[in-house]
Image: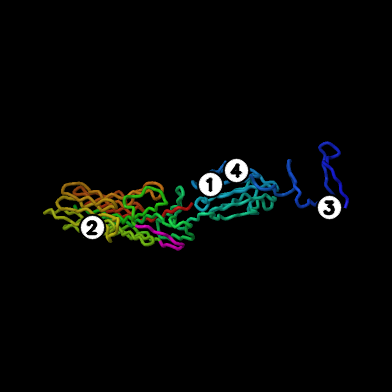
Amino acid sequence: MSEVKVNKISPRTNCGTVQLGDSGDTITIPAGATITNNGTQTGFGRTGTVDWQTGDIKTANFTAVNGEGYFCNTTSSSFTMTMPSGSAGAIVSIQDYNKTFDTNSFTVTPASGEKINGGITDGSLTISTEGQGITFVYVDSTVGWKTIHENAFTAGGEGFITATGGTITTSGNCKIHTFTGPGTFCVSAIATTAANNVVSYMVVAGGAGGGATAGGSFAAGGGGAGGFREDKSPVTPYTASPLDGAGPITVTASPYPISIGGGGAAGPTSSGTIQGASGGNSIFSTITSAGGGGGGAGANPASPGVPGGSGGGSGGFDGGPFGCGTGGTGNTPPVSPPQGNNGGIGTGGDAPGGGGGGATGAGTNSAPGTGPKAGGAGATTSITASPVTYSAGGSSGNYPSGTTPSGNAGDNTGDGGDAAGGNGRQSANGGSGIVVIRYKFQ
């Protein structure tokens, strides 16, 4: 084998081309040799690894640059990366920055007229897998950008709860699952630290409907609020309600069926002796919140409020002597802290009914010659990342002028329905319940 030793090979003419061997030859670079590229390479296909842009975390729509890698943070919202115009060997990489692609997806779209993985021209790729990372290399016009490497998230050191179910949002290091209808909180993996498997939760039952009103001047009692129960885990910071402390729940890798109580219907106007319907129970694991008790009907004598998570207010009546209706008993069945309060007392002699009980306050008692009585106050918690009040009692109907509620209680509030006053007016339905589960995910 012959050998030539030189320090530099240059073309015969200035800026000419140097050719190594002929077509069909094999050029061998021995083991241990180093090739340093100080210029621009062409014809080698893939141009190497990407330069990760660690100082520029992406949080909104952007256009990628060949040779760069991007950490993409969809914690606040989904967004799109547009690929650069493709050239053979061009390379771009992306990585889920905060493991939130499953909550807010990330979309990759090619430059105009190009493809991804041989799909349709201008077709986008949506990535919705937690912790996903992908490297793209542009091959040719037939397949366009090809995904040559994909990785799934692997927890290192500390593992956290992984779960599905309901509507999922994030707040800081916490994930929040909100159930507005029946479903399953399905835990597929638990945390490696035992304390991180204790979840925060709020379970709100359905509120009750206001009582019935017959013709004449009878005023019905307000519907009782759905039972409210909450427990805040020490590892999930937020401002809890005064009723925090229902008891810790430590989850395992198991499915947890969720029940959401419906709101109770208002009593019909065709009868002055029918109470409003009670709300339905809501359930998560070992925690059951009881539906609110129906409001008492306006009648003579007044019908009582129904017991429940919070009790319904009793109906009022227009006769004398000034008898008293009975407010429904709250916190039924009893739990600690109490899940609700008693309904207010209705009276006779030109009097409204009693207000429905609420999570943190009893319904207001009526008095002759006075206006509608407020339901008991609800409970305010920031478990969903902003303060919201749930499980307020419904107000009573008025006498003698009569009142009609402006509408039914809101869905997924657990509020009791407001009551009508006299002349066959229609009372309001209670609001359905809600379940919220919050845990540390990173």
Give the amino acid at mark 3: Asp
Q: Tell me, yes or no, whether the two marked residues, 3 and 1, touch with CB atoms within 8 Å.
A: no
33 vs 152, left or right, is right
Point out the frontmost of discs 2 and 4: 4
Q: Which of 164 and 292 is in front in this view?
A: 164
Circle 1 residue: 73
Residue 53 numbered tag: 4
Q: How far apart are marks 2 and 4 (CA)?
A: 64 Å
Asked if marks 2 and 4 touch (Cβ < 8 Å), the reply is no
Q: Report the span colored magenta.
A: 247-257
Q: Which of marks 1 and 4 is nearer the N terminus?
A: 4
Q: Mark 2 points at which residue?
A: 328
Looking at the picture, does residue 109 appear above or below residue 333? above
Amino acid type at circle 4 is Gln
Element marked by disc 3: loop
Name the quadrant containing residue 266.
bottom left
Give the residue displayed 42% in from the left and 51% down from the top.
235
**Which residue, given by chain and number where applicable, does mark 3 sit on?**
25
**Which of pointers 2 and 1 indicates the residue nearer the eye?**
1
With respect to residue 372, does 254 lie above or below? Answer: below
Label 2 environment density (alpha carbons within 10 Å; few <14, some 14–19, many ≥20): many
For the residue labelled by badge 1, is the local secondary structure a helix, a strand or a loop? loop
Q: Mark 4: few, some, or many residues within 10 Å (few <14, many ≥20)? A: few
